[in-house]
Amino acid sequence: MPQSIRPGERDDDRHDRTRRISWVDMEGVQRARVLVVGAGALGNEAVKDLMLFGFRKVDVLDMDTVVRSNLNRCVLFREGDQRSGRGKASLVAERARDLYPEAEVQAIEERVQSLGPVEMQGYDLILGCLDNVAARLHLNANSYHAGVPYVDGGTDGFRGRVQVVMPPLTPCLQCGMNRSHFKVMERRFSCTGQDTVFYRPKMAAEITTTSIIAAVQVREAVKIVSHRPVMEHVMHYDGLAGTSDILSLDIDQGCPNHPAV
Ligand SMILES: [Zn+2]
């Protein structure tokens, strides 16, 4: 061991072990303004990872409250939260600050539809931690228009998916969607009877796949703020088979989010 390094010398630095990864820009991480949309399963895991990694400026948007069936996969919720009447976003923000007191974590208890390009332009990146296609498409279109990187995550039981969208260079979420997604969405809209209510399916969900997908989202976020190449473009994860595949997409000439293409 070199004479200049004593055992434990750097152990007072919270981020010492991360700083040993040469390409990680810790100043960039701490400076970045991140918006997490959705404070459910993926949102809980993503915020936990953001805090432990050292992100300091995080806003969390959700207008739901906790139900007991959330507790199988939400690390920041506690038994009894379902009776508190408090919003998911406010609980996540409060407990995130426990994890990392230097962080400024703000809850935004509003609908996804309240976010337009103007609101998004204040962020360096957006993590989509949503459970339905319509809200994703809203976030995708508006973040693309605002020129803000968008990292979308989704799970369905033991399967998951992450897409990194870097406007104006990469395809967006809508480019990778086939018509069946839209048919399902149209059917769900027609069930609600109005176009301002997003259908919320009760899908299979568990913590192991949630953890993996949210971790990949935060890992890509670290690359974005460190100006490193990001994943191109979609990761499909199959937990039952234990595999993950990367799928490259092209910009869809018919996609309305790329008018100049
Ligand atoms: Zn597109």
Image (cartoon, helix red, strand yellow):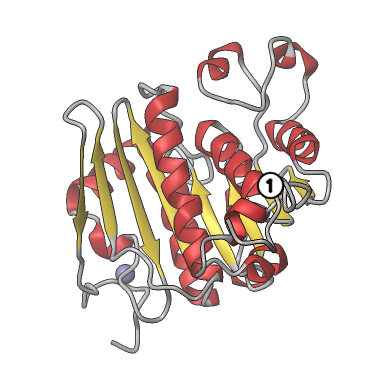
Residue that appears at 74% across and 37% down: 99
Residue 17 to residue 159: above or below = below
Question: Residue 63's image quarter?
Answer: top right
Question: Residue 98's image quarter?
Answer: top right
Q: Amino acid at mark 1?
A: Pro
Between 149 and 53, the residue placed more toward the observer is 53
Q: Position of residue 243 (x, y in %)?
A: 19, 38
Q: Position of residue 129 (x, y in %)?
A: 50, 44
Residue 72 to residue 177: above or below = above
Residue 137 to residue 79: above or below = below
Is residue 104 in view from this perspective?
A: yes
Residue 246 to residue 67: above or below = below
146 sits left or right of 256 in the view: right
Between 25 and 185, the residue placed more toward the observer is 25
Residue that appears at 57% across and 25% down: 74
Q: Residues within 10 Å of mark 1 (few under 14, many from 20)?
A: few
143 sits left or right of 52 in the view: left
Q: Position of residue 186 (x, y in %)?
A: 31, 44
Residue that appears at 51% across and 16% down: 72
Question: Residue 249's image quarter?
Answer: bottom left
202 sits left or right of 111 in the view: left
Between 260 and 25, the residue placed more toward the observer is 25
Q: Quadrant of ligand 1?
A: bottom left
Local SS, label 1: loop
Residue that appears at 28% across and 71% down: 255
Look at the image and tell me in which quarter the N terminus lies: bottom right
> Residue at label 1?
7
Look at the image and tell me in which quarter the C terminus lies: bottom left
73 sits left or right of 163 in the view: right
